[in-house]
Image (cartoon, rainbow, N blue to C red):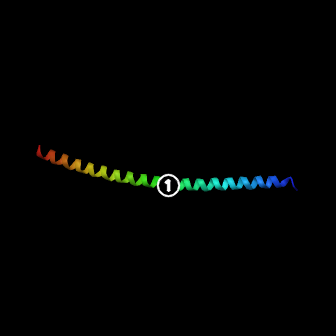
Amino acid sequence: MISYFPAILAAGAAYGGVRAGLNGARQSIVQIEKIVTRLDEKVDDHGERLVAVEIEQRILKEKRNGRE
């Protein structure tokens, strides 16, 4: 019976380590999700700006072609 005690302690320590590791992983995943969300918003903003520039460019080309 006494020989099982160290095994039980080792199992408990391993469980605690795994649990702590999973909590750390959860926190990392939450941080990664926040970063990805911010990057996605920036990409959307840049995409909207590009569309606006393309539209303005098309308008200017049409005006230029109308004068020639």
Say which amino acid is labelled 1.
Glu
Residue at 20% x, 50% y is: 59
According to the picture, the residue beneath numbered tag 1 turns out to be 33
Residue at 25% x, 51% y is: 55
Residue at 59% x, 53% y is: 25
Q: Nearer the viewer, residue 53 or 30?
A: 30
Q: Position of residue 68 (x, y in %)?
A: 11, 43
Instruction: Tell me the quarter of the picture where residue 5 sits.
Output: bottom right
Q: Nearer the viewer, residue 13 or 58?
A: 13
Residue at 81% x, 52% y is: 6
Q: Position of residue 42 (x, y in %)?
A: 38, 52
36 horizontally vs 50: left or right: right
In what element is the residue under mark 1?
Answer: helix
Q: Position of residue 4 (x, y in %)?
A: 84, 54
Q: Nearer the viewer, residue 53 or 36?
A: 36
29 horizontally vs 62: left or right: right
Quick one: label 1, few (<14), some, or many (20+) residues within 10 Å? Answer: few
User: Residue most toward the top?
Assistant: 68
In which quadrant is the N terminus drawn?
bottom right
Q: Position of residue 49 (x, y in %)?
A: 30, 51
